[in-house]
Amino acid sequence: MHAPILMMIIFILLSSTTPAFSSYTSNNFPIAKPNCSDTCGDKSIPFPFGTTPECCISQEFRLTCNHTSFDPPKLFHGETNYEFTDISLDGQITFMNSIAHECFNSNGTRSSNFSEGIRLGSYFTLNDTANKFTMVGCSAIAVFGGTTTFNQSVVIGGGALCSTEAELSEGTCNGVGCSQIDIPRNVWEYFILIQSWTNYTDIWDFSNCTYAFVVEESAFKFSKDNLTNLSRVKSLPVVADWVVRNETCDMAMGNATGYACVSANSACYNPTDSYGYRCRCKDGFQGNPYLSQGCVDVDECLNENIHNCNKHAICTNTIGNYTCTCPKNYEGDGMGEDGCKEKAPKDMKITYIAIGVASGVICLLLGIILLYLELKRRSDNKMKRKFFLQNGGHMLQEKLARREASPEMVTIFSSLELQKATNTFHSSMIIGRGGFGTVYKGVLADARTVAIKRSIRVDPTQIEQFINEVVVLSQINHRNVVRLLGCCLETDVPLLVYEFIGNGTLSSHLHNEAKARALDWTTRLKIAAETAGVLSYLHSSASTPIIHRDVKSDNILLDHALTVKVSDFGASKLVPIDLAQLSTVVLGTLGYLDPEYMQTNQLTEKSDVHSFGVVLLELVTGRKALSFNRPVEEKSLSNYFLYVLKQDLLVKIIDEKIVGLGNMEQISRVCKLAKECLNVKGEDRPSMKEVAMELEGLIRREKHSWATNVDDEEEMKSLIPNDHDGTSGVGYDSICRDHIVLPINGGR
Ligand SMILES: *[C@@H]1O[C@H](CO)[C@@H](O)[C@H](O)[C@H]1NC(C)=O
Ligand SMILES: *[C@@H]1O[C@H](CO)[C@@H](O)[C@H](O)[C@H]1NC(C)=O
Ligand SMILES: *[C@@H]1O[C@H](CO)[C@@H](O)[C@H](O)[C@H]1NC(C)=O
Ligand SMILES: *[C@@H]1O[C@H](CO)[C@@H](O)[C@H](O)[C@H]1NC(C)=O
Ligand SMILES: *[C@@H]1O[C@H](CO)[C@@H](O)[C@H](O)[C@H]1NC(C)=O
Ligand SMILES: *[C@@H]1O[C@H](CO)[C@@H](O)[C@H](O)[C@H]1NC(C)=O
Ligand SMILES: *[C@@H]1O[C@H](CO)[C@@H](O)[C@H](O)[C@H]1NC(C)=O
Ligand SMILES: *[C@@H]1O[C@H](CO)[C@@H](O)[C@H](O)[C@H]1NC(C)=O
Ligand SMILES: *[C@@H]1O[C@H](CO)[C@@H](O)[C@H](O)[C@H]1NC(C)=O
Ligand SMILES: *[C@@H]1O[C@H](CO)[C@@H](O)[C@H](O)[C@H]1NC(C)=O
Ligand SMILES: *[C@@H]1O[C@H](CO)[C@@H](O)[C@H](O)[C@H]1NC(C)=O
Ligand SMILES: *[C@@H]1O[C@H](CO)[C@@H](O)[C@H](O)[C@H]1NC(C)=O
């Protein structure tokens, strides 16, 4: 039942004794030889000292411990019989030395004197820093005489005087009643002589002796009582240094048998300015270097004052030293204040590195991309500028500046604008392809739908002409002309931007069965008239005549009200460089091409007239101008037409879809007109103006025929001017022979 309490008490007792154990273990090394007593009372006796001849290194170190007469026992040096009170392995001993004195009775007679010489022994010298030669008394004179280990005589002397008790100051030895002087070095023999200046009769009541002695400075503190009471003191401590041998280390180390520093990890050293040598344990070891195995490793880690490990560090003792290791999550050498620093967790570190590297790479890539984009932008801009100049942009700008063209009329688009409008010229936006390039549908930022024509490369020699053309065409504002809104010159080939016409080409209407049926004769006549009107207008009205060059059903667009919109004016002037050998093909379309132009290469308005003649034939016959899937003689519509005219078989080729009540005469007239237009010689063809008027006349007559059907002749005559000498229609009466009357223009 009481067992737990008992256990607890025992535990507490054990715990409380632990410090004692640990302080013991810290000095747990032998200081004396085996079987040798290492203490005398409370005093330790380290080797080379010993109390028996076996236990000391030599006779000079022989000590006796007197248990019999003293309690506690006292330790005496064998040779000198001085009492040793302390022995240190660092090389000092403390011994007790008597005081020299001379005392007087109150009547002036000497009552006692004592003075003796001291011989310390071969290996002992007075420690000159720890001891002082001290004189006490009010009439004292003293001399210290000694011999050094180098056999030199030294003498020092002084005195202590005083006349009144009041002069004396407690605690200080300043020459009044007490004085101290340094002693010489390496003194191993000395004597003290004292002399009293007076017989103390005057001052006997407070001072009656002269004293002189060598004393450990710290062990003597002057008091005025000491002027009389020191007589009762037998001895005072004196510090002496010792060496284990009187030779130097170098000499000793050559003597294998006599060398005193026998322990492993010990070293020999010569005391400064002294003689002989001593031994010490090397750093990191402690113990007695004069014993074999005397120097033992110091466990520095047990004492925070010895090791320099950081408070976080783990101290590990090694033989002769120690290591400081920072714990996990700390880094550093483990030494001192900043020895261990908390470090970022390893995986975090890796993450940081990864983040660092990654961001570096990303930055680099970004930089490269930005640089690339910038360079590309610059080169793009450079290219744009180059193309702009190459395509005559400068010229156009000049013209705009000179107000030859108004900026509202012609817009210079940026390539970016048009790229956006066409979804980067996506193939789904293509609405037509032709000899001159590709036509895209586009929606501008302002929601306008436009047709963008990407033409073939412009001949550099024709740039000016091209620009002129652009300017002129942009100024045409005719209801039957597809308006040129502007251009873009920043691309390798110029882009022309037109108004967008949504209902397709005349060609697509004519050559599609269903649509063709919807085109009745009246509509066709209207289309013919409108087209002729446009061509006439362009040939005559503009400052310089504009020749279309490529009149064909493909270039006649229709809007939803089937109103004609003629497109591609002047565009045929864009002579493609790389297609130069095909220029004849491109500068017009086979089947429509003026044979005279093909021969002479001289382009006139009459070329347009010829081509228009073919368009008229298309309207009348519904056939294509050139169809390769027909018999040889029928391939070219114009040739075939002329052929059937000769054969009087016109009916064969007239589109039956248009043949209706009472329109045969009109059809015949149109045929007649077409025949004239197709004249081989240009000058034999009517002018576009005449053609237009003829067609207008036909339309008007048709309307009139519903109403009056009178004055046709007169009207026609008044309408058609007489200024074209070479366009006589005379002699063609027979051409459309079947019931066709030819009143036109001939009677001049
Ligand atoms: C120590 O003394 C004991 C007896 O007192 C003896 O048996 C032993 O041999 C001695 N050891 C040495 C090293 O002298
Ligand atoms: C101890 O000291 C006394 C007095 O000085 C002396 O008589 C005695 O012989 C000593 N004993 C030893 C063992 O030295
Ligand atoms: C010196 O004086 C002290 C005290 O005054 C006395 O005890 C001592 O006996 C005197 N000494 C002599 C030699 O008279
Ligand atoms: C004085 O001195 C003598 C010796 O010279 C001595 O016998 C005597 O006792 C002394 N007495 C006194 C009081 O001084
Ligand atoms: C002591 O000294 C005084 C004067 O200095 C002297 O008169 C006296 O005789 C001396 N006493 C003795 C005993 O010598
Ligand atoms: C004092 O010492 C001297 C020698 O220095 C001696 O002659 C004298 O007898 C001694 N006196 C006493 C009292 O011891
Ligand atoms: C005197 O003793 C002190 C320790 O008290 C020591 O440090 C010093 O070295 C000694 N002097 C000599 C000359 O050995
Ligand atoms: C020390 O010196 C004295 C004389 O000064 C001399 O007689 C003596 O022989 C010397 N001793 C040694 C050991 O040198
Ligand atoms: C000097 O006198 C004081 C005061 O009486 C005393 O404590 C001290 O022990 C004396 N000094 C010595 C070395 O006896
Ligand atoms: C050293 O001491 C020995 C005796 O131990 C002595 O014979 C020798 O002369 C001394 N040498 C010196 C230099 O003091
Ligand atoms: C070596 O040391 C021994 C013991 O101290 C001594 O007897 C001997 O003379 C020394 N030899 C030399 C050369 O110093
Ligand atoms: C002990 O180790 C520390 C470092 O840990 C080093 O600075 C020191 O010099 C070493 N001491 C010895 C005696 O090797």
Image: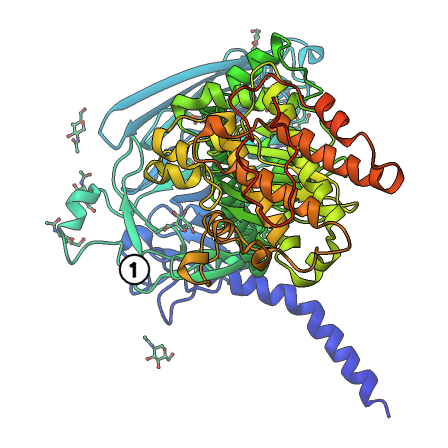
Point out residue 44 in the picture as x, y percentages from the top left corner: 47, 57
Q: Is residue 403 left or right of residue 361?
A: right
In this rendered view, identify the residue nearer to me: 407 or 515: 515
Q: Is residue 167 above or below residue 265?
A: above
**Image mark count:** 1
126 left or right of 523 in image: left
Q: Which residue is mark 1?
A: 263
Please identify the quarter of the rendering in which residue 724 is found.
Answer: top right
> Is residue 71 among the parts visible in the rendering?
no
Q: Visible in this render: residue 88?
A: yes
Q: Confirm if mark 1 falls within 8 A of ligand 12.
A: no
Residue lying at the far right of the rendered structure: 707
Q: Residue at x 48, y 29 (%)?
A: 684
Which quarter shows the C terminus? top right
Check disc 1: other Cα within 10 Å, few if <14, some if 14-19, many if 20+.
Answer: many
Q: Position of residue 316 (x, y in %)?
A: 48, 61
Where, by quadrant of the figure, is residue 527 drawn?
A: top right
* Mark 1 residue type: Ser
Residue nearer the viewer, 162 or 283: 283
Of residue 434 and residue 169, the one placed in the foreground of this image is 434
Residue 746 in the image, given as x and y percentages of width and height: 60, 28
Which element carries disc 1, helix, strand or loop?
A: loop
**Position of 102 compared to 484: left or right?**
left
Residue at 43 percent of width and 52 percent of height: 76
Q: How is the image coloured?
A: rainbow
Quarter holding the N terminus is bottom right
Indicate the position of residue 485 as horizontal and vertical percent values.
67, 29
What residue is shown at x 38% (from left), y 67% (from top)?
36
